[in-house]
Image: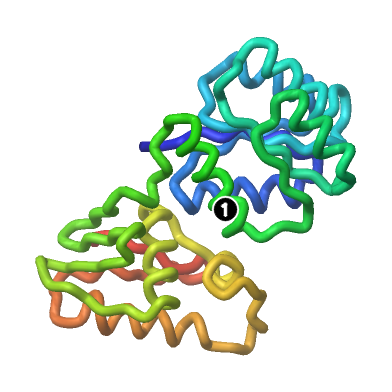
């Protein structure tokens, strides 16, 4: 299932990073840069969760939270803001927010909190529970298992995380920068070949012995997982 997120964030760089992260995870993410835009955007579609910054132009995140709750009592709302004072948290929760995270944050924790909110709201947890199938390759993110042509393939945790990232991109190239941030939580120096080494590890385990190669390189763009 493809879950839809509506994000309120006025920092273009951070909004783009969050958008890219959720896109890689198989979500759809729409971004509004001020509160009034978000309230207009939410009337154009149905969303599974709202992520709101507080300090944004026009209507702030707290005002937006109140407006949403006046019309929608059930869709989860997560506040994601630099305001860490307890009074801000209390006010947000009082207005109807379901959870509150303070910047800076870790993307894995953000995903875990979103899954928990979706679970509590009665929505399925996320695409992480579903097996991803590409030709004869099956990747199960929940069980962390991989099979190709019915044969189980043993991967290290890093190899699996890299394969999962490529699989969820659904054929789109994933850049080295995105891989380093999502798999290793750091930015590699341009001189390192760590990512190339792990791509070769995956090729030896996934593609070796098969006529149909699934792991590909697009020079200048990154790596992608797709049948020829």
**Above or below — where is 116 with respect to 140?**
above
Q: Residue at x 34, y 63 (%)?
A: 225
Residue 54 image position (x, y, % from top left): 82, 35
Residue 136 image position (x, y, % from top left): 15, 61
Q: Residue at x 18, y 57 (%)?
A: 135
Near-viewer residue (122 or 206): 122
Looking at the image, residue 102 sits to the left or right of residue 83; the answer is left
Residue 154 image position (x, y, % from top left): 26, 79
Q: Across the whole image, how many numbered discs are drawn on residues?
A: 1
Residue 148 image position (x, y, % from top left): 17, 68
**Above or below — where is 26 with respect to 182?**
above
Q: Which residue is mark 1?
A: 21
Q: In the rendered view of the protein, which quadrant contains the N terminus?
A: top left
Q: In the rendered view of the protein, which quadrant contains the C terminus?
A: bottom left
Q: Residue at x 72, y 38 (%)?
A: 79
Q: How is the image coloured?
A: rainbow
**Above or below — where is 202 with respect to 47?**
below
**Above or below — where is 92 with respect to 190?**
above
Q: Residue at x 58, y 47 (%)?
A: 113
């Amino acid at each position: 299932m493809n879950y839809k997120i509506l994000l309120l964030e006025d920092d273009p760089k951070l909004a783009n990073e969050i958008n890219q992260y959720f896109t890689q995870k198989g979500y759809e993410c729409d971004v509004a840069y001020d509160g009034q835009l978000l309230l207009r955007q939410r009337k154009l579609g149905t969303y599974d969760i709202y992520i709101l910054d507080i300090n944004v132009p026009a209507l702030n995140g707290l005002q937006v939270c109140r407006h949403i709750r006046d019309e929608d009592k059930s869709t989860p709302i997560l506040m994601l803001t630099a305001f860490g004072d307890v009074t801000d948290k209390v006010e947000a929760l009082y207005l109807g927010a379901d959870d509150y995270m303070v910047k800076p944050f870790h993307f894995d924790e953000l995903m875990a909190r979103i899954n928990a909110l979706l679970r509590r709201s009665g929505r399925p947890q996320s695409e992480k529970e579903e097996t991803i199938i590409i030709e004869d390759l099956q990747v199960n993110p929940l069980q962390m298992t991989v099979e190709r042509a019915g044969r189980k393939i043993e991967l290290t945790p890093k190899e699996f995380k890299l394969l999962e990232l490529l699989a969820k991109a659904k054929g789109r190239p994933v850049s080295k920068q995105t891989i380093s941030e999502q798999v290793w939580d750091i930015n590699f120096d341009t001189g390192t070949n760590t990512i190339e080494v792990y791509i070769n590890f995956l090729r030896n385990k996934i593609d070796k012995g098969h006529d149909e190669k699934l792991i590909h390189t697009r020079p200048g763009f990154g790596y992608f997982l797709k049948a020829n």
